[in-house]
Image (cartoon, rainbow, N blue to C red):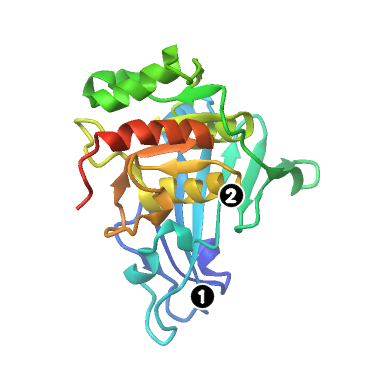
Amino acid sequence: RNSVHHTGRVCVTASEEDQVPMPVPPGKPAGKYVVLYDPLDGSTNIDVNVSIGTIFSIHKRVTKRSSPAGLADCLQAGKKQVAAGYILYGSSTMLVYTTGQGVHGFTLDPTIGEFLLSHPNITTPPVGKYYSVNESNWNRWTPPVQRVVGAFKNGEGKVQPKNARYIGSLVADFHRNLISGGIFLYPADTNHPQGKLRLLYEAGPLAFMVEQAGGRATDGCRSILDIVPADLHQHTPLVIGSKDDVAYAARVLSAEAVPVK
């Protein structure tokens, strides 16, 4: 946060670790951008050396520069993002991002300390090989969610069976599916009726990225990018990945969904 606040480009930041937005300190130049981020996704995997990451989202400020930046600048729909990305810390360190003109991946070259373009113009296949979901939550899911996961697992109609891959680190699971094709699901359940993932720091930025790569993201009823947050730490269900796989899941889930008020 301190590094971002001292760039002169940013007016306010917020993360899932902050209770309130953090404006640039008095006396420091404030810019026109808002940075929202998850500083360490998959942190429970650190001790076992599994890939983890950082997710970020950038918006333009909407309040007047003559007034302090704050909550109103943070609570913007995902479709208003000007950039989003993540850093993946694994066998190599990668920066993957979009500014609305495609998705591009850069790999850290430790010999020169620079990120080099290694994955230009990433596109995700329309149908993927993998499905990623925590199946231990099965008994807490609604029947439509169970049907969707069962179809990806065993096949149903035109849906071919997929291989299960679940790391438990959102960035790592998303990255694999982005490159190879697949679908990641974190649906609502009886323990988390509003979903568990955070809209602003996790679902929103990854939704912007996947749609730039030719994929799709939904909460089961709506595009993630269309949701206007009402709360800084708002949660959401998330179905994200290859567009045909997500389209199938959305059809099943929306058919039996409770209308959004």
Few, some or many residues within 10 Å of mark 2 (<14, 14–19, 20+): many
Q: Residue furthest front?
A: 157
Q: Is residue 124 visible?
A: yes
What kind of element bears circle 1?
A: loop
Few, some or many residues within 10 Å of mark 1 (<14, 14–19, 20+): some
Task: Choose between 74 and 253: the one closer to the eye.
Answer: 253
Which mark is drawn over residue 212? 2
Determine which residue is flagged by label 1. 32
Q: Nearer the viewer, mark 2 or mark 1?
A: 2
Q: Does the CB distance between marks 2 and 1 fall below 8 Å?
A: no
Residue 190 drawn at (x, y percent): 19, 30
Corner quadrant of residue 257 = top left
What kind of element bears circle 2?
A: helix
179 relative to 80, above or below: above
Q: Is residue 16 visible?
A: no
Residue 132 drawn at (x, y percent): 46, 25
The residue sitting at 40% across, 48% down in the picture is 223
Q: CA distance from mark 2 to mark 1?
A: 23 Å
Residue 194 drawn at (x, y percent): 24, 42
Q: Amino acid at mark 2?
A: Gln
The residue sitting at 61% across, 37% down in the picture is 124
221 relative to 186, above or below: below
Of mark 2 and mark 1, the one earlier in the sequence is: 1
